[in-house]
């Protein structure tokens, strides 16, 4: 038990340091001065892949159309929808013929995954100097395009990704989804997405650079020339986590990228039920670890040691354990909640759900068992009525 608690404390101290750095580096986009784009505004195409998104597509498209930016066009691909999405898009295109273009998706080739195929088709029709890819369950604030384009110029980057402000409805959304952001901000120093670590030897910087790559496919903005230079979505056509794949390709290609907090820029509600939540994460959980079985199992065990064992053992240690073990477990629990409440406050999430952090970790462990069962039994997860 002593060794396990020391492991938990060590892990929490390291991740706490990373979280501290990210509080300084992972910032929202800066506001754009009035009249900033009066003389010159690069053309922007906002691309939206949509398959059976009747519940969210209208808000998404309208928010993209209503951007306070003088030179943008919205391009939506209807990916063989069967739920009323097509009718909504047809109505919107009648009302906004100059700003909105809707195209019908072609049948998916066998060697492509659905989202990458849809985005590839969109990219072939996009005429802008800058291409946005946003998910149909997101919505933009009116100044988002101006902020992104200005930032791409001022920071001299080829690719920007935003992590949306997540909105929740159900109990399980509030319990599970925050752990995605928690993992990101406690494991990845976001400063190294933009620049290589100074402590890395020079001969390793180019080779190691893609390891510090992350992206959120809910909002990605590329300079078109850079996107084409890395092969676009065709380069990740069979990658479940195509957003991370594109980020790695950007860095491998010697281009620059940066990641920002999506506050006051983009919002998203990823899933609307426990079933959607389960299926959504089931399709990409293992892929998020690069299909590395040792890493996947190892991180699962490490999370059990860090986030579950200390809090479960604490009552027993209070009654029957030594003072040393009790203090170690208590320190681990306090550090865990300090990190979690920091993230919850940062993203304006209800703090009371932070107390359920161990429950959320347990949910992911059960999902991990399901994913391993899928892997060993060669079972394909499904999403939007397609095998992944």
Image (spheres, grey):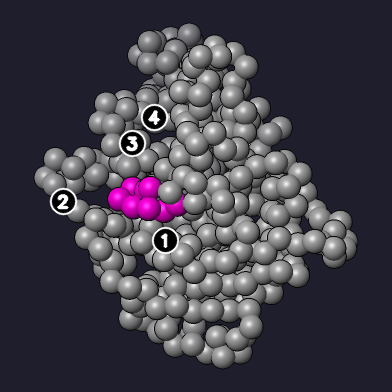
The residue that mark 3 highlights is 290
Q: Is residue 57 magenta?
A: no
Q: Is residue 158 above or below residue 78?
A: above
Task: Give the image quarter of residue 363.
Answer: top left
Quadrant where the C terminus sits is bottom left
The circle on residue 314 is: none
Observer able to see residue 282 = no
The residue that mark 1 highlights is 120
Mark 1 nearby-residue class (10 Å; few <14, some 14–19, many ≥20):
many
Q: CA distance from mark 4 to mark 2?
A: 25 Å
Q: Which label lies toward us, 2 or 3?
A: 3
Magenta region, residue range: 232-240
Verify CB contact (< 8 Å) between mark 4 and mark 2: no
The circle on residue 379 is: 2
Is tag 4's residue or tag 2's residue first in the polypeptide sequence? 4
Is tag 1's residue or tag 3's residue first in the polypeptide sequence? 1
Q: CA distance from mark 4 to mark 1?
A: 37 Å
């Amino acid at each position: 038990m002593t060794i396990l608690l020391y492991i938990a404390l060590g892990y929490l101290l390291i991740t706490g340091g990373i979280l501290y750095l990210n509080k300084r580096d992972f910032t929202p986009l800066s506001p754009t001065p009035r009249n900033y784009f009066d003389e010159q505004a690069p053309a922007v195409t906002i691309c939206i892949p949509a398959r059976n998104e009747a519940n969210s597509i209208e808000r998404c498209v309208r928010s993209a159309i209503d951007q306070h930016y003088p030179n943008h066009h919205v391009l939506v691909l209807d990916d063989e929808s069967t739920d009323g999405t097509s009718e909504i898009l047809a109505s919107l295109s009648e009302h906004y013929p100059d700003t909105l273009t809707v195209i019908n998706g072609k049948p998916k080739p066998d060697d492509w995954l659905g989202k990458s195929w849809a985005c590839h088709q969109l990219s072939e029709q996009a005429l802008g100097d800058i291409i946005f890819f946003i998910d149909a369950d997101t919505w933009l604030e009116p100044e988002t395009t101006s902020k992104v384009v200005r930032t791409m110029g001022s920071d001299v980057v080829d690719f920007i990704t935003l992590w949306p402000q997540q909105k929740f409805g159900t109990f399980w959304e509030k319990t599970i989804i925050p752990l995605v952001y928690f993992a990101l901000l406690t494991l990845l120093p976001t400063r190294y997405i933009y620049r290589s670590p100074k402590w890395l030897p020079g001969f390793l910087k180019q080779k190691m650079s893609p390891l510090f790559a992350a992206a959120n496919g809910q909002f990605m903005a590329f300079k078109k020339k850079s996107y084409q230079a890395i092969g676009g979505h065709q380069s990740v056509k069979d990658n479940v986590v195509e957003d991370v794949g594109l980020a790695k390709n950007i860095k491998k290609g010697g281009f620059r990228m940066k990641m920002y907090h999506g506050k006051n820029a983009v919002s998203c509600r990823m899933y609307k039920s426990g079933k959607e939540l389960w299926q959504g994460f089931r399709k990409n959980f293992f892929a998020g670890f690069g299909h590395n079985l040792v890493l996947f199992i190892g991180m699962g065990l490490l999370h059990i040691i860090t986030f579950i064992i200390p809090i479960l053992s604490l009552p027993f240690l209070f009654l029957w354990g030594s003072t040393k073990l009790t203090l170690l477990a208590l320190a681990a629990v306090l550090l865990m909640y300090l990190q979690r409440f920091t993230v919850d406050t940062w993203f304006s999430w209800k703090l009371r759900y932070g107390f359920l952090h161990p429950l959320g970790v347990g949910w992911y462990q059960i999902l991990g068992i399901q994913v391993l069962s899928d892997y060993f039994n060669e079972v394909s997860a499904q999403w939007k009525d397609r095998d992944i």
